[in-house]
Image (tube, rainbow, N blue to C red):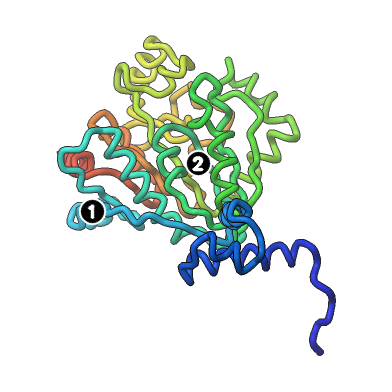
Amino acid sequence: MRDKSPLTTDDRRSDLLIRVASMYYERDYSQQKIADVLNTSRSNVSRLLKEAKTKGFVEIRVHKRVATAVALEQALVDQFDIEAALVFEGGNLDYHSRLERVGLLAARHLETQIEEGDTLAISWGTAVASAVGAFPVMTNLHTDVVQMIGTVGRVDSIIDGPDLSRELANKLGGQHYYLNAPLFVDSASTRAIFLQQPIIAETLSMARKAQVALVGIGTTVPGKSSFLRARHLSEADLDRLRAQGAVGEVSGQHFDIEGNADGIDLNERVIGLTAAEIRRIPRISAVACGAHKVQSILGALRGGYLSALATDDMTATEILRAAIT
């Protein structure tokens, strides 16, 4: 039997937004013509179109051309047995321009990996922010986004975990979950106390069960560590990490050139997922490029911290060269 229940106010509003958007984007009506049809003002039509985009009834994409190096992508997949490699052919572009395109490639790949109702765990940093910024609005996916590492707090907030999780959750039509804890604490015993707090334990439990993750890859190269710039680590701390063999990190977990995280004491002070827990997430996309990241990315690949890598051609070439030397 046909459902004869009356339309709600929200239903009517949604129908209006879809009608206005259809006239404007599909039938090429001008805003003034739509205003005439609806017997309203042009400014009100403009507000309705903006609301339609905000609520996800309209998705607008600018399909930037991103040239990729197919041979390098296949070489990375073959060498490291990962599911996907996305390699931007950068030409003479500078680092920041390359990172923007690499982030776009990561976003496009993740679009194909996220299924409706998934939970996505997210790290932090400029590279992760480049991917989040490139995501289109896909509210129909109802994907929750959860921090997998504590809050950095001493950097521009738009690249920190809370802002990134909120921005991406809004685009994916889900809820965002903050890990209300610092990134590093002073000892393993202090970490244990934090992990006993119900809200922290609940958030980390959600991150452990995520089907998808988006991470950056950090380095221990002198002067290049993001944690150094955020003033969480000093050069002396980095010297100690390098002495313990650390070449890079994923979500705060440092590892050596083979991807081994054992024996690196800083890892015991991180509020976030452990190295083993990160590796158990089924679909992990990493975003990283630059000569200073080559050893870090190589260690992450060997250690199984990612299933897909978005990088650029210069970095990919050096990773493959380093892998056979």
Observer-nearest residue: 315 or 89? 89
Question: In screen coordinates, is 320 left or right of 288?
Answer: left
Q: Which mark is residue 158?
A: none
Quadrant (top left, top right, bottom left, bottom right) of the N terminus: bottom right
Report if residue 242 is visible in the image. yes
Examine the image and state in which quarter residue 70 appears.
Answer: bottom left
Secondary structure beneath disc 2? Answer: helix
Quadrant (top left, top right, bottom left, bottom right) of the C terminus: top left
Report the residue at 25% width, 51% height from top: 76
Label 2, label 1: how far apart the Cα atoms are? 32 Å
Whichever of labels 2 and 1 marks the residue nearer the N terminus, that label is 1
Is 78 located above or below residue 293 in the figure?
below
Report the residue at 60% width, 65% height from top: 36
Residue holding disc 2: 276
Is 301 located above or below residue 163 in the figure?
below
Q: At which x and y percent is residue 154?
A: 52, 19
Observer-nearest residue: 230 or 196? 230
Residue furthest to the bottom in view is: 1
Q: Would you say the residues marked 2 and 1 are in contact, meaning their CB atoms lie under 8 Å apart? A: no
Examine the image and state in which quarter residue 273 appears.
Answer: top right
Q: Which mark is residue 68?
A: 1
Observer-nearest residue: 206 or 36? 36
Is 100 located above or below residue 266 in the figure?
below
Q: At which x and y percent is residue 133?
A: 45, 43
Report if residue 324 is visible in the image. no
